[in-house]
Image (spheres, rainbow, N blue to C red):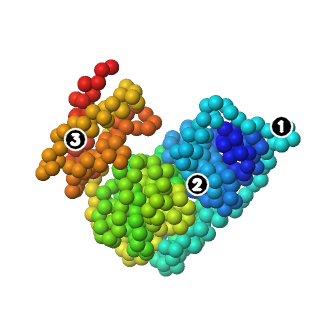
Amino acid sequence: MAFGTFVGGRTVVIGRDSRTSSPTVRHAVLAGLFATGCHVIDVGLCPTPTILLAAKARQAHGSITITASHNPVEWNGIEFAAASGNLLTQVERDELMRIYETEDFALTPWNEQGTLETYAEATTHHLNQILRSSWFEPDNVRDADLKVVIDAGNGAGSVISLPLLRDLGCRVVELNCVADGHFRRAAEPTPDALGELCETVRVSGADIGFAHDGDADRLVVVTERGVPLSGEWTLAFVVDFILSKTKGDIVATVSTSRMLDDIATNHGVALHRTKVGVGWVVEKMHEVNAVIGGEGTGGVIYPDVHYTTDGIASLAAIAQYLAESGGTVTQLVENIPHYEMCRKKLDIPSQEVARWLVELALKFYKVGCVPESEPFLELTDGIKRVWNDRWVNIRKSGTESVIRVFSEAPTSEEAEHLCDETLETLRKLMKQISP
């Protein structure tokens, strides 16, 4: 009801992922939108980027995606977007929450209730947008005759990634491609969740393996040797590929791998860093007219398609990147200078204590700064200490009472040492804060 009020009772596109609870949530969403007089266009079971793109195609005044994305199967949620599938700005988020919290709903009388329409062409439209992208040359993929294993995680990617790969002439091995909502692996495609995919790639002799999260806005890669790669590699591969087609700025978050710094330098373009969050990346991409952007989660944003993370477009981009390289995924990895990451967190009593701790840490690192030996301090999101070949970021979580500490260095041992050293400093500083 709050969102129906927010969009003025006009047109809203809705869609859902494959979770077994999604139909239940759909009925609740429809009830709220109908009560505020909205005309609802239902695209059915689709990936999040497909739903947002459909909202743009139908010139909707807003959209709602029923999904918990990469979260565990028992979770579900609703994601809001503004006109034409654009992510909500901070001002729009604040206004939506004001309506919700005050229950200032614009309910309509019995004779002005909302209406429902179905739109069955959402996936076709999305695929056509990818195929028409300036960087995409489908025949190059078809000529390569790639053998691909796709693990859709029983999520929404099942309904679109298989048709795309087959259209590109790939020999496809399906894994978890029934969109029944009974996830047979963790929804988030982290390396430790992809054992079956890695084994299938090895046994089948595939050229590459792909895995989606629950709503397919992310994509990760497995090498031809069955080695799982983190989402950092998805963004690195795509950025290197896109910059080989067109020059322009890159945008990524402060916690994304410094592989992007090396790639940007190699192509002679600028890399802009933002706060963590897709919305911040999109905002900066508009500002600098970037040709590509994303996060190290495996989420990449393609302006040619739409300003949202799109795991299906990444499927096309990386397939072409591999096809045009004439080599293997392992060789692509070896061609990019890479680093090791460490991610840890420190439990904090409250968000307020977390804020105080970050402020104390900033004072500590500023006072201890010696130009000859200390790193550069970047304060875009929390505190990021940056050396020539490594960095560590201290950031207050926006959703939990924790401080997140991410680090990256040439080796895993160095990255973990940097993370642990930072956590020890934070624990010492925390003793200065009264309970």
Assign the N terminus to one quadrant of the image.
top right
The residue closer to the viewer here, 407 or 198, is 407
Residue drawn at (49%, 50%) of the image? 279
Q: Position of residue 270 (x, y in %)?
A: 35, 65
Residue depth check, mark 3 versus mark 2: number of the one nearer the observer: 3
Query: Gap between marks 3 and 1, in whole Å?
Result: 60 Å
Residue drawn at (66%, 43%) of the image? 6
Q: Position of residue 200 (x, y in %)?
A: 44, 59
Q: Which residue is mark 1?
A: 109
Q: Amino acid at mark 1?
A: Pro
Q: Amino acid at mark 3?
A: Lys
Q: Is residue 323 above or below residue 114?
A: below
Q: Secondary structure at mark 3?
A: helix
The mark found on residue 89 in the picture is: none
First in residue order: circle 1 vs circle 2: 2
* Count of residue discs: 3
Q: Amino acid at mark 2?
A: Asn
Q: Residues within 10 Å of mark 3 (few under 14, many from 20)?
A: few
First in residue order: circle 3 vs circle 1: 1
Q: Secondary structure at mark 1?
A: loop
Q: Which residue is mark 3?
A: 366
The mark found on residue 86 in the picture is: 2
